[in-house]
Image (spheres, coloured by chain):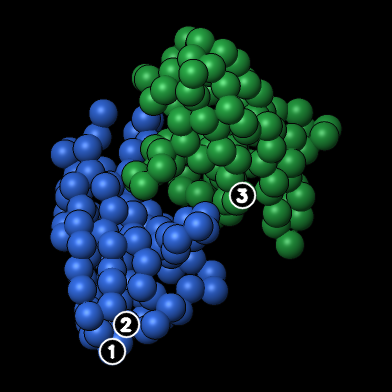
Chain colours: A green, B blue
Amino acid sequence: QVQMVESGGGVVQPGGSLRLSCAASGFTFSLYGMHWVRQAPGKGLEWVAFVRDDESFKYYVDSVKGRFTISRDNSKKMLYLEMNSLRAEDTALYYCAKSWNDRSFDYWGQGTLVTVSS
Amino acid sequence: DIQLTQSPSFLSASVGDRVTITCRASQGISSSLAWYLQKPGKAPKLLIYAASTLQSGVPSRFSGSGSGTEFTLTISSLQPEDFATYYCQQVNNYPLTFGGGTKVEIK
């Protein structure tokens, strides 16, 4: 069955960095685009970034452009999110999600919590 | 960026009720809309994509309709497991955006 497990979250000071990982299994990872989505505590969902199956195309929400980098390793079935210059407003549960045929998200991980605080 | 406005943001309903949630887009998005359900402490679950196509395994009491700028999610007979927060999402243009959510609670 399809499974995605995120890791790498934690507490970091403003201006710090973190690298999130998402381990995928149960589907042919190299054939699907992948997304990161976040949810601040008690708030709604916010799409963060997308990477095409072959890494030829990447998109970001404006608030993270220049600070976050999405990448993937198809040989390892891994998705990553490198986060730099972190701000308090980046505090959230970060989900990885698999892209469905129309860009909706058919499978989600359980999330990893990032807390940016001094 | 395309803004999505969901209404209501909160509704109280009883088991067996028919429930309708509306999602309005700030510009036309054809049928490029998805609906998700999220329960507390859980990841969202895809219910409907392409505005009206039921995701595999989702009960038929859920249905979606609409195109352009106005969309609806209908639950024909609310069940106990349906009490949750519902989100619409436009997948027409990047950045992908979500509505603010509709929390469905037990009356």
The answer to whether residue B78 is left or right of residue A18 is left
Query: Which of the pair B19/A26 is nearer the observer?
Result: B19
**Circles 1 and 2 in contact, beta carbons < 8 Å:** yes
Marks 1/3: CA distance? 31 Å
| Chain letter for mark 2 | B
The amino acid type found where label 3 is placed reads Gly
Residues indicated by labels 1 and 2 sit on the same polypeptide chain: yes
Q: Is residue A53 above or below residue A44?
A: above
Q: Earlier in the sequence, mark 1 or mark 2?
A: 1
- Quickly name the residue at label 2: B78
- Quickly name the residue at label 1: B16
Where is residue A42 drawn, in percent x and y?
36, 47
Quick one: SS at disc 3? Answer: loop
Quick one: SS at disc 2? Answer: loop
- Return the residue found at the far bottom: B16
The amino acid type found where label 2 is placed reads Leu
Where is residue B13 drawn, in percent x and y?
22, 79
Q: Residue at x 39, y 25 (%)?
A: A89
Q: Residue at x 76, y 50 (%)?
A: A25
The amino acid type found where label 1 is placed reads Gly
Marks 1/2: CA distance? 5 Å
Query: Which of the pair B68/B5 is nearer the observer?
Result: B5
- Quickly name the residue at label 3: A109
**Circles 2 and 3 in contact, beta carbons < 8 Å:** no
| Chain letter for mark 1 | B
Query: Which of the pair B12/A53 is nearer the observer?
Result: B12
Report crowding for label 1: few under 14, some 14 to 19, many 20 or more residues within 10 A (C-alpha).
few
